[in-house]
Amino acid sequence: MKIIFRLATNFFQKSRKPLSNKLNSMKIVQLVCTYPPYKGGMGSSALSLARALSDKHQLTTLTPKYGPDYISSLKTKYLKPILKLGNAALLPQVSKYLQKGEVVIFHYPFFGTDLILFLYKIIRSRKQKLIIHYHMDVFKLNFWSRLFKLPSRLIAPLLFRKADLITCFSLDYVRESQIKKYYLKNPSKFREIPYGLDTEKFYPSKKPGREKWVNLLFVGGLDKAHYFKGLGYLLEAISKISTPIVLNVVGQGDLKNHFQKKSRDLKINDRVNFLGSITGSGLPNTYRENDLLVLPSIDRSEAFGVVLLEALASGLPVIASDLPGVRTVFREGEEGLLVPPEDTEKLKEKIEYLSKRPELRQEMGEKGRLLVKKQQSRRALKNKFNKILKEL
């Protein structure tokens, strides 16, 4: 009897080994509407996730091809859309790649391709796990964009029901978002995950002291798609400040000339530097050369604010709008300050307050660095997401 028991035990142990290996390394396919070299928060977060998981799992990223490919060791497929409008794109060819994945990570919103994914989930009987990462609500679309979004409005509730789990960077944002009703009915389906910032790339300056002038930094797209960044309100706040402050604006887009004209009209063009697009090591260096980051976003199109993490990791305190999601990136009064959206007077007061207190800026910057390393680093994302995969 003992011999039979031992043989049976050995058999089951051997039979479980392939399952254990499968859980250790999984085939993952992620779909995202934008990806580097295109600049934007969605693509950057998908890249962070790919970097965090690719050392252990076989991860392939599927994304529309709008220009040159991003040169990387990570496996990426740039697919030509049969139909596109802005960041919406129809990619029917994703279905052949989806078949190869045990887990699909779908970055939402991705109008057009969400229909392809939904049809694939209906037609395919294979039990494939679906994780939807909810980035943000979408506002202020033009007529054609609204027309493109219409099928997505009908599909989205069904797609969310088919998802095994829904991830986000901030549950605070989700509770106030366009899917808050679904969250309230299914809170156990949601998981908050870290962003996964590279804290070795973004780190504080070691140079002693600061100049007499306080250097403010704004980082964001200067195009119509990023209307919500609130640069116009920041320029108006600067025009009301008499203390020695310089604003450095990083970003490019079709509204750049508009903002340059606005700075001239406000007679602050001698205190505002438009630096254009900065890539590679230039961006971390730019953070280190400044004293304070300001993110004056105006509505829920700003769901989190990756630039806040980049600034905090670089040892800069931050000032940001008091918006769902954004307000959870840091602690009010500890690593930065919050202001009501579109309130130029309050924004002016907070900028003046921190610009006159270099010791407080230093203290906030040090706390910010520790916060990001602990809660939002690549290691934190890797650990959290592997736990989520283990759940599946």
Image (spheres, rainbow, N blue to C red):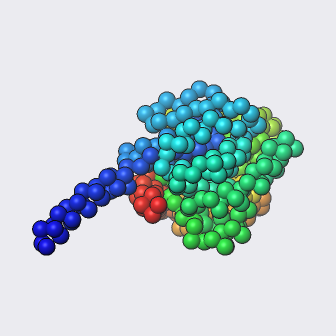
Kindly give the residue lying farthest to the top in the view shown.
68
Q: Residue at x 61, y 44 (%)?
A: 32
| 4 to the left or right of 25 | left
Direction from residue 168 to residue 240 in the image, left or right: right
- Residue 292 visible in the snapshot: no
Image position, residue 371 (x, y; %): 47, 62
Looking at the image, residue 154 sits to the left or right of residue 107; the answer is right
Residue 172 falls in which quadrant of the image?
bottom right
Q: Is residue 348 left or right of residue 389?
A: right
- Nearer to me, 297 or 93: 93
For the point 51% across and 35% down, the residue is 76
Residue 327: x, y in percent? 62, 64
* Residue occupying the point 24% across, 56% down: 14
Q: Nearer the viewer, residue 38 or 31?
A: 31
Q: Residue 193's spot in the image, x, y percent?
A: 52, 60
Q: Is residue 180 above or below residue 297?
A: below
Q: How many marks?
A: 0
Q: What's the residue at 57%, 67% (across, down)?
A: 189
Q: Nearer the viewer, residue 293 or 154?
A: 154
